[in-house]
Amino acid sequence: IFGNPWIFIRGVPAMKFLPPEGPPEVAFAGRSNVGKSSLINALVGQKGLARTSNTPGRTQELNYFVPDGYSGEGDDLPPAALVDMPGYGYAQAPKEQVDAWTKLVFDYLRGRATLKRVYVLIDSRHGIKKNDDEVLTLLDKAAVSYQIVLTKTDKIKAAGVPKLLAETAAKIAKHPAAYPEILATSSEKASGLDELRAEIARTVGV
Ligand code: GDP
């Protein structure tokens, strides 16, 4: 699935706009500015696929991406889909926006049988913060399997990575739906990307 071009198919502001369940999908979640768009773009090798630097307050949508070249009709379904979930954790976000995020995300997580895994991105410089932990709890409640992906590892000293991995592993140990293995990535240095691509391919079964 990687190595071929991916395309954006739609932005989903509410459950009724979700594409019909079809291919297995994996989703990406993280605090705004965690490096989510950069990571998705680095994974597929297309700079402009996911839009970087989302502005706070803009419409919150689930963005759907699929490999190009499938009509989506009949049996001509794409083999997988990637879903970019709206970022969370803006300090300035009004309560209504946080509530709308939680509703959309929880409805999606609970209702989507074809969702195979959520990759929860954590900035290497910050580790798991309170609002990340709340999202992990939401994922536990929705009983969706998820895996932690550290981003921007180029921003910390190489010697700090094992320590961060150990601290992060200790924090997720109490989360029942968390996959124990944590991935360390840098979109900037293209490190950890092959491991993440392999995990995704295995997860969607291609
Ligand atoms: P998003 O809001 O989670 O989609 O985050 P973006 O992908 O827009 O990235 C936020 C900022 O972090 C941008 O200035 C990126 O250039 C920067 N960034 C993203 N990934 C990396 C990385 O791996 N290393 C470094 N040094 N900076 C990164």
Image (tube, grey):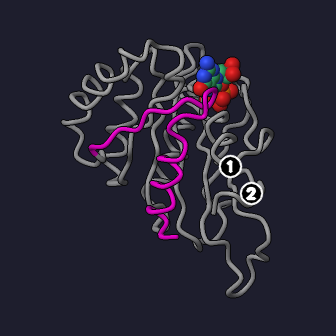
Residue 171 x/y as whole percent: 25, 28
The amino acid type, in three-letter code, at marker 2 is Trp
Q: Nearer the viewer, residue 101 or 189?
A: 189
Residue 164 x/y as whole percent: 33, 21
CA neighbours of label 2 inside 10 A, class few (<14), some (14 to 19), many (20+): many
Q: In this rendering, is residue 7 above or below 131? A: below
At horizontal 51% and vertical 28% (from top left) the residue drawn is 151
Callouts 1 and 2 close, C-beta under 8 Å: yes
The circle drawn on residue 6 is: 2
Residue 59 x/y as whole percent: 72, 36
Q: Is residue 68 left or right of residue 177?
A: right
Reply yes or no: does residue 47 show up in magenta: no
The amino acid type, in three-letter code, at marker 1 is Val
User: Quick check: which quadrant has ligand 1?
Assistant: top right
At horizontal 41% and vertical 38% (from top left) the residue drawn is 183
The mark nearer the N terminus, 1 or 2, is 2
CA neighbours of label 1 inside 10 A, class few (<14), some (14 to 19), many (20+): some
Magenta part of the chain: 180-206
Say which element carries label 2: strand
The circle drawn on residue 44 is: 1
Residue 11 x/y as whole percent: 73, 50
The CA distance from mark 1 to mark 2 is: 7 Å
Q: Nearer the viewer, residue 192 or 71?
A: 192
The circle drawn on residue 100 is: none
